[in-house]
Amino acid sequence: MKIFVFIFLLEQILASNPIDVGIIFTKAGGNDNLIEKFKTCVSSILKYSSVDLNLYIIGDTESQYIAKNVISKIKQPKINVNLKSIDADSLAKKMHDLVSKMQNHFSHSPTSYYGDSLFFLSIGLHKVFSPIINKIILLDSDLKFKKDISDLHALFSNFSETNLIGIARDGQPVYRHLFWQYRKENPDTRVGSPPPDGLTGFNSGVLLLDLAKMRKSELYNQLLTHEKVDYLTKKYYFKGHLGDQDFFTLVGMEHEELFYVLPCQWNRQLCRWWGEHGYADVIDQYYTCNYDIFIYHGNCNTPIPKDEDDNEYQSYFIRVKDDL
């Protein structure tokens, strides 16, 4: 009986601790489309959340101001939200050496969309974020939650001893395409092949980062070196353009054990671009997700399904543009 009481009390204590959540929100000034996406993302998180949140907005000064304005107009949730601003420029300076190693391999150019330092943030967040934060959920802003974010956070408990990062497979054959030369030379490879048995590659729109384990992992930190990155890119003939998810994908080809694969319903990517550009015959092998959806991801500007009560939540944003 005492054991059950102890477990119950422990669960209550853990449940009372705020969840750390980061959202990358940058270059929002004058970008109405991005602001609308952010509204949808944050309002849906707060709509379903049953736990208090430390919400980190990672972006430039103007974007942080817009984010605060947006959040102030959301229907007040029954939870406490501790809003924290993280300056993108400051993080970029701290990560300069690391990012410079990655940009040559995983972006078209440092000035391209995914060449921005923030799109490599997750790779080295354990080095620059507060050491008292051990676990964080890191999100893109083009998401819509249909489930309590505490249920997403609970997936940390499914990590094995070696898992550092929770991340979903990419819902398209993008890495089948990018690894074409390696696949040609290795016809029986799992690299770039579809689920459930293939090494499909990852999408970083929803990330569970165990920062404490990332800090301690000798293997992971060795993989961040120029020598290791250069070795892997040459071995797999890889040149990416999608920032952090390219790095995680490449590392996953050699070290599956570092990753916990999120079920597809926790990052239901809606984009089917590759199905219209040469891969119509295989797109459904990557895209299919026959489960109740917990997070919609409107990647490549794909519309996200509407809910009946969306207008109720969106009505709190009517004055945002005027206020800005």
Image: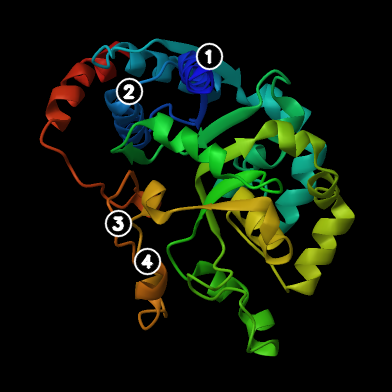
Q: Quadrant of the C terminus?
A: top left
* Numbered mark located on residue 287 in the image: 4
112 or 255: nearer the eye?
Answer: 255
The local crowd at label 4, few if under 14, some if 14 to 19, many if 20 or more residues have their Cα within 10 Å, is many
| Sequence-first tag of 2 and 3 | 2
The residue at which mark 2 appears reads as 46
Q: Which residue shows up at 55% across the image and 38% down it? A: 157
Tag in front: 3 or 1: 3
| Sequence-first tag of 3 and 1 | 1
89 or 162: nearer the eye?
Answer: 162
Are discs 4 and 1 less than 8 Å apart at CB? no
Amino acid type assigned to the residue bearing label 4 in the image: Tyr
* Numbered mark located on residue 291 in the image: 3
The residue at which mark 1 appears reads as 84
The answer to whether 110 is drawn above or below residue 85 in the figure is: below
Q: Is residue 109 visible?
A: no
Amino acid type assigned to the residue bearing label 2 in the image: Leu
The CA distance from mark 4 to mark 1 is: 35 Å
Q: Which residue shows up at 48% across the image and 60% down it? A: 170
The local crowd at label 2, few if under 14, some if 14 to 19, many if 20 or more residues have their Cα within 10 Å, is many
151 or 124: nearer the eye?
Answer: 151
